[in-house]
Structures are given as C-alpha cells and as structure tokens.
Image (cartoon, grey):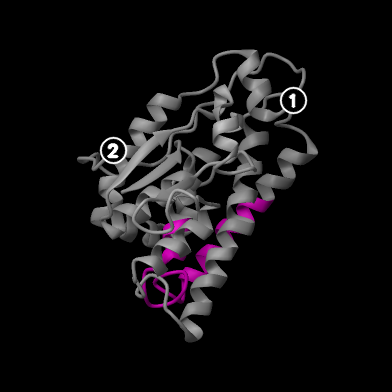
Amino acid sequence: MIDLYGGSSPNAIKVVLMLEELQLPYKLIEVNAFQGEQYSPEFLTLNPLGKYPVIIDHSGAGPDQPIFESGAILQYLAETYDRAELLPASGSARWEVLKWLTVQVAWVGPMLGQHVHFRIHPSEAAGYAAARYRNQAMRVFEVLDARLSTHPYLAGREYSIADIATFPWIRVLRSLGFSWTNYPHLKNWFDTIAIRPAVVRTEHCYKRLASAMAFPKSEEDLNRFFGRSTGPDVHFEMLRPDSPPETSERV
C-alpha cells in the first residue's frame, strides 16, 4: 500500500495518474493547502519544504523514507516497480525521458504556476509580472507543440513519465486564457492521453479533490496560501480544466 499526501494541484494529480497507470493500491490523504496543513509539524517531517505530493511506500522504501518532489516520485515508482516502458533503464531513450521530465518540473510547472498566480490576482493582472508570465506560458505551449509536431510523445515514440508529468498541467490550457487552435499538435497529444484508462480513472479522483479543496474563503486563507502578511480582499477566478468524461475511481 502507498500513502499519497496531496490535493488537487497538477503536481499531485500526476502522481495519482502514475499510480493508476501502475495499478498500485494507494490511499489518498488530503492536505488542505489553503488551511496551511502542509506546514504542520507532522507534515514537515515528511517534507521539510512544506509541499505536496509526498508518498510513503510501505511495500518499498518504507515509512522511514518518504519520497517527495513529484518528478522524483515518478522516477521512484517507475524504477521500483520495473516499468521500463515508462522510464528506460539505460541508453538514449532514458535520457530523452529524463530531459523532458526535467523540462516539466523545472520550466512548465513553474511558468504556468506563476501565470496562474498573477492571472487570478486582480491587483496584479495588468502589471509587468502578469505580462511576463503570460508570455512564458505561451512559450511553454509553443515549445511543446513544436516538439509534438515531430514526435507522438514528449520523449519520442513511447508514452513515458515525461508525458504523465506534463499532462495535468496542460489540461488547464483554456482556463489560462489560451486556445487549442493555436497548438494542434499539443491538442492531439492531449486527446490521445486523455482516453487512456488510467487517465479516465484519475478524473473522478481529481474532481473529488477539487471539490474538497475549493478556493480560499477568507482573507486569512489567502494570506496563508500566498505567504503574504497583508493585502486587499481578493476574489479569485475559478480555473476549470478541460475534463474527460467522469468514470469510477479507485481510491
């Protein structure tokens, strides 16, 4: 059994997707970031960064070795459970997967995350930072679309943990103010992955998490979540991702 600490963020959903792909039994332990549960003493013993996702694999690394950082979790799961088709053991194919996995964790996630932050902050939406990160988000989609114009998957011919890591971030493309029509190869890749059985199973779990987490309801929640000491009363624009059909869940 694997304990997964997380919420509805793309970084946690990518781990749910991986666990579904591997068909491993897991228990989802919800961490409410808006209430600051990620900074509790108990959680900080699992990840001193105060971030989810974190897994504890009772059948693998064990309770004394929590695994945090989503990219590391995906690599751990692929190697521990001998899924070389998702992460080859050696050679150029392995390096292609690791390169594009690193692109996601070091660039795609951070740039889209910053775009979300300034897009939903009305006080910042017309400023320099908002324009900068919108341009960065556009660049992310352009680069991925160009890559997928010549390869069916990010690392080449085969579906891999690089695709698993990236897919949950791309699902919010329209909610971020962009159009699929500008990125036809990215859209084809997205549609291909969206019908994988593991992705369909993950969707119901995502909706449950999104409903449970909702958005902050008070100024205190906002200040805690964004790490600010004071600020205006901000009303957020809810981001609704494009969703495949809802199906049964395994957790």
Inspect this view and state whether residue 143 appears. Answer: no
Where are the magenta residues, as a range?
136-165
The quadrant in which the C terminus is found is: top left
Q: Amino acid at mark 2?
A: His
Q: Compared with residue 13, is residue 195 higher up or lower down, i.e. above or below?
A: below
Relative side of 2 to 102, left or right: left
Q: Find residue 187 and report its horizontal and vertical position in percent.
A: 41, 57
Relative side of 20 to 169, left or right: left
Q: Amino acid at mark 1?
A: Arg
> Disc 1 marks which residue?
228
Confirm whether the magenta stretch covers residue 139.
yes
Q: Residue lying farthest right?
A: 128
Q: Find residue 225 and report its horizontal and vertical position in percent.
A: 63, 27
**Quarter of the image holding residue 211?**
top left
2 or 1: tag closer to the N-terminus: 2
> Disc 2 marks which residue?
204
Q: Find residue 126 and report its horizontal and vertical position in percent.
A: 74, 32
- Say which of 191 and 99 sits in front: 99
Disc 1 residue crowd, few under 14, some 14–19, many 20+, Cα 10 Å: few
Q: Compared with residue 191, is residue 244 higher up or lower down, i.e. above or below?
A: above
Q: Residue at horizontal 29%, vertical 59%?
A: 22
Q: Compared with residue 183, is residue 42 higher up or lower down, i.e. above or below?
A: above
Disc 2 residue crowd, few under 14, some 14–19, many 20+, Cα 10 Å: many
Inspect this view and state whether residue 201 appears. Answer: yes
Q: Residue at horizontal 34%, vertical 70%?
A: 83
Confirm whether the magenta stretch covers residue 130.
no
